[in-house]
Amino acid sequence: MIRARITGTGSYMPEQIRTNFDIEKMVDTTNDWIVARTGIEERRIAAEGEYTSDMATRAAERALEMAGVSASEIDLIVLGTITGDYPWPATACIVQQNLGANNAYAYDISAACTGFVYALGCANDFIQSGRGKKVLVIGAETLSRIIDWTDRNTCVLFGDGAGAVLLEASEDGDAGLLSSHMHSDGSYFDLLYQPGFGTRIMLSAENYDNRSNYLKMQGNEVFKVAVRSLTSVSLEALEANGLSASDVSLFIPHQANKRILEATAKRIKLNDDQVYINVHKYGNTSGATIPVAMDEANRAGMLNAGDIILLSAFGGGFTWGSALIRW
Ligand code: COA
């Protein structure tokens, strides 16, 4: 049986750190409020002239380097992002150009914070179908440019960054992606979205003055559905593989908010030491949170042969998904 194995991980976080104390000077908030409600202490902000494609490229280079694979060997690049360099073409094509991955084709996936998990699912299907052998799966975001830095309800939550994994076809042993599960429900689309500027709410003086080009969110509603969906899709992955919470070596959830992660872990019946959390350092980097966390955990020696790794994400759309991996 062909399985998609992760043979390299990489990440890139911009240098500039914006702490809660920095944000105290921008909006009516406090470090204590942000830490108590979200667990976030600081986030990274892309430098002027630094774009999603740049961060995605750095993360991808690091994943390729770890795997010992050259860019020309890649068959496909799938990038989960909602903050691409341009409305189109796909930022994945710019990453392809940067890497010199001339034998690949490349596309973006727009599934907000579930973007990486969706991308991983598509890449897994591609490999299992026998269509290709090596896929770069990336999550990269420059959310700081679609955040309204005058809105305390949202600006404290998000940050920038990129993570990547290299998936390779393997017929050797039982390691690899065991299953992936994807869902969406468009009836919730306007609880978490960016109204402008697409082709519906276009760039105009009025729409600009309304701040339509910034992320809008109903935080309370999002919170409730996020916990419910992350729990159900995590259990779905375990059940599909005949496993239970005690079999999970590490749960790497989308890092939205510490309270969401803790509530979800409790419902799945996971202990604290089974859950990877780095939201305090980076905030919510949407499609980038899971591959960044995976890379950190991998480089810290926390992912070992045979380990069962559970990934789950939730985001705008609403979208949600999970993947179960035997490392
Ligand atoms: N600093 C201080 N006060 C703030 C604040 C901030 N940064 N943001 C909101 N508040 C205020 C609100 O204005 C409100 O004040 P009011 O009672 O006077 O109206 C009060 O805090 C409570 O707001 P509420 O929205 O009920 O707080 P909450 O406990 O739900 O926490 C979130 C707000 C955003 C932290 C929480 O809802 C959340 O995490 N939601 C999920 C968001 C998310 O993860 N989105 C991405 C999913 S992928």
Image (spheres, rainbow, N blue to C red):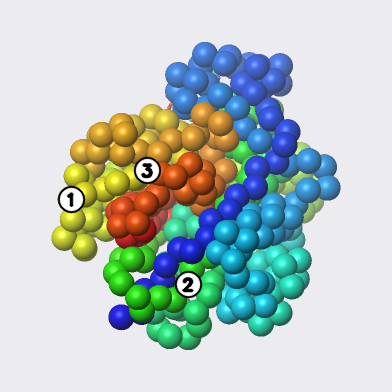
Alpha-carbon span between mark 3 and mark 2 = 31 Å
How far across and down, in percent of the image, does residue 151 sit?
A: 63, 29
Q: Kindly state the secondary structure of the residue where label 2 is placed.
A: strand
Residue at the location (23% across, 56% down)?
238
Q: Kindly state the secondary structure of the residue where label 3 is placed.
A: helix
How far across and down, in percent of the image, does residue 230 sit?
A: 33, 47
Look at the numbered disc 1 and say if its residue's Cβ is closer than 8 Å to ligand 1.
no
- For label 2, the residue is 168
197 or 116: nearer the eye?
116
**Can I make out residue 274 in this image?**
yes
The amino acid pointed to by label 2 is Glu
Q: Kindly state the secondary structure of the residue where label 1 is placed.
A: loop
Residue at the location (26% across, 34% down)?
271
The amino acid pointed to by label 3 is Ala
- For label 1, the residue is 244
- For label 3, the residue is 226
N-term-proximal mark, 3 vs 1: 3
Left or right of 202 in this view: 222? left
Alpha-carbon span between mark 3 and mark 1 = 21 Å
**Vertical arrangement, residue 274 with respect to residue 2, above or below:** above
Indicate the quadrant containing the C terminus: top left, top right, bottom left or bottom right: bottom left
Alpha-carbon span between mark 2 and mark 1 = 27 Å
Left or right of 319 in this view: 271? left
Residue at the location (60% across, 50% down)?
11
User: Callout 1: few (<14), some (14-19), or many (20+) C-alpha neighbours within 10 Å?
Assistant: some
N-term-proximal mark, 3 vs 2: 2
